[in-house]
Image (cartoon, rainbow, N blue to C red):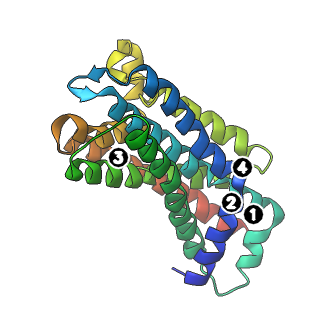
Amino acid sequence: MNANYLRIEILRIFRNRRALVFSILMPALLLGIFGSLYKNESLNGAAASAYLMVSMGLFGSMTAAIGSGGTIAVERGIGWNRQLRLTPLRPATYALTKVVVALILALPPLLVTYVIGIFGLGVRLPMHTWLLVAVISWLGALPFAALGLLIGYLAKPDSVQPISGLLYMVLAAFGGIWVPAESMPDTMRNIAEWTPAYWVGQAARSPLFHQSVQARAVEMVLVWTVVLAAVALARFRRDTARA
């Protein structure tokens, strides 16, 4: 990892306020609206407000992680990645830095939704549950960071934002992020179980119900991360060899 390049990327990505604000504002608004409607409800023994808080935090982190791949498409379009290859920076370091930046971008939406949950909706959880939820939600951005990397190497600069936007909307709708998968029709639930969003949601929300992490959900998140990372790496190598 090149510390100087990572610092430059972090500073540059946080200057893109439009993307950052959207990944924070959208889940915050949804949490405020639906959280106030179901504030005093419960879902299978867990407070609905806590369930919604975790779900909307995941939506924000997923949005940020997938959207981070847009910079790769732009840099490929203007030839910036070719310029970087004239420097001592290794191509693998370039890709790894993008993943790290995606994880950093996933933090603000999580923090904002947690603050709204605590002070706006009165969410109260044991400390170990908070830690499990926060860590799993943050690391759950990894498969979406890999997906963003893949989109960055497949899409053109003028199409990367629509593709990214469509993907995280579809994943949120059909992956049980916006609507609990348990309340979906059987066909939709079967579809949900084939998405990484479903398993990230299951893993992050399981401490709310069981005070522990659902092992199968974690395993499936790891599988999705490895699969998407492998496909993104293959595309990355093809792009590097061609340039």
Dot 4 or dot 1, earlier in sequence: 4
Could you tell me which residue is drawn at 75 percent across and 63 percent down?
75
Task: Provide the secondary structure element on which disc 1 rests.
Answer: helix
The residue beneath circle 4 is 18
- Residue 179 at x, y = what percent? 43, 23
Which three-letter amino acid code belongs to the residue tagged 4?
A: Arg
Task: Compute the Cα span from label 1 to label 3.
Answer: 29 Å
> Which disc number belongs to residue 72?
2
Q: Amino acid at mark 2?
A: Ile
CA separation in Å, label 1 and label 2: 5 Å
Residue 66, placed above or below residue 9 = above
Indicate the position of residue 113 as horizontal and vertical percent values.
46, 43
Residue at coordinates 26% horizontally, 51% vertically from top-left?
A: 132
What residue is drawn where x is 32% and y is 43%?
204
**x and y percentages locating residue 139 in the rendered image:** 38, 55
Q: Which mark is residue 221?
A: 3
How far apart in space, not on screen, are marks 4 and 1 (Cα)? 18 Å
Callout 1 crowding tier (Cα within 10 Å): few <14, some 14–19, many ≥20 = some
Q: Is residue 207 left or right of residue 25?
A: left
Element type where label 2 sits in the image? helix
Q: CA distance from mark 3 to mark 2?
A: 24 Å
Q: Amino acid at mark 1?
A: Glu
Identity, as a three-letter code, of the amino acid under mark 3: Val
The residue beneath circle 1 is: 75
Q: Earlier in the sequence, mark 4 or mark 3?
A: 4
